[in-house]
Image: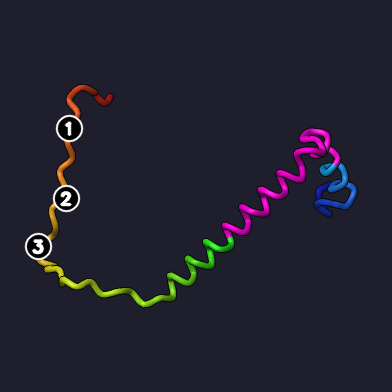
Amino acid sequence: MLRNGLEPWHLLIVAIVIIVLFGSKKLPDTARALGKSMRILKSETSAMKHDDTAPPTVSAAPRSESAPEAAPARPVDEGTTTR
């Protein structure tokens, strides 16, 4: 039954349903927004790959490994309770 997966007529039915649901006026805007999102995603992933290959920068002040830094104190809101 599901041996061939999606056949061409399945894709035609899906396309017709999408056109009926969203209308022909919104489809170009949706496709444009999807293309823009894909370009942004592609540029961000290539930037992440480029950042991974860059050598790590060395900090100016060396840290002492024997004494860990203290975490900054957060103020406590006494007006709310968490349960």
Amino acid type, label 2: Ala
Vertical placement of 76 versus 42: above or below?
above
Which quadrant would residue 17 be assigned to in this image? top right
Judging by the rendered image, the residue that carries numbered circle 1 is 76
User: Which amino acid, mark 1?
Assistant: Val
The span picked out in magenta is 16-41
Label 2 and label 3: CA atoms lie apart by 12 Å
- Check the picture and name the quadrant holding the C terminus: top left
**Mark 2 or 3, which is nearer the eye?**
2
Q: Is 53 on the left or on the right of 82, as rendered?
A: right
Of the two numbered discs 3 and 1 in the rendering, the one whose residue sits closer to the viewer: 1
Residue at the disc numbered 3: 67
Q: Earlier in the sequence, mark 2 or mark 1?
A: 2
Name the element at disc 3.
loop
Please state the horizontal and vertical placement of residue 52, each as a whole percent of the image.
Answer: 43, 71
Give yes or no for residue 23 being in the magenta stretch.
Answer: yes
| Residue 63 position by quadrant | bottom left
Q: Mark 2 and 3 residues: CB-CB less than 8 Å, in contact?
A: no
Q: What label does residue 71 carry, if any?
A: 2
Could you tell me which residue is drawn at 59 percent across and 62 percent down?
42
Classify mark 1: residues with Cα within 10 Å, few (<14), some (14-19) or many (20+). few
> Residue at coordinates 63% horizontally, 56% vertically from top-left?
38
Mark 3 or 1, nearer chain start: 3
Q: Position of residue 69 (x, y in %)?
A: 14, 57
Residue drawn at x 16%, y 50% as measured from the top left? 71
Q: Position of residue 62 (x, y in %)?
A: 15, 72
Q: Amino acid at mark 3?
A: Ala
The kind of secondary structure the magenta stretch mainly shows is: helix
**Circle 2 sits in a helix, a strand or a loop, which is it?**
loop
Viewer-side residue, 37 vs 78: 37
Instruction: Kindly identify the residue that appears in the image at 84 percent across and 48 percent down.
Output: 11
Per the model, the C-alpha gap separating discs 2 and 1 is 15 Å
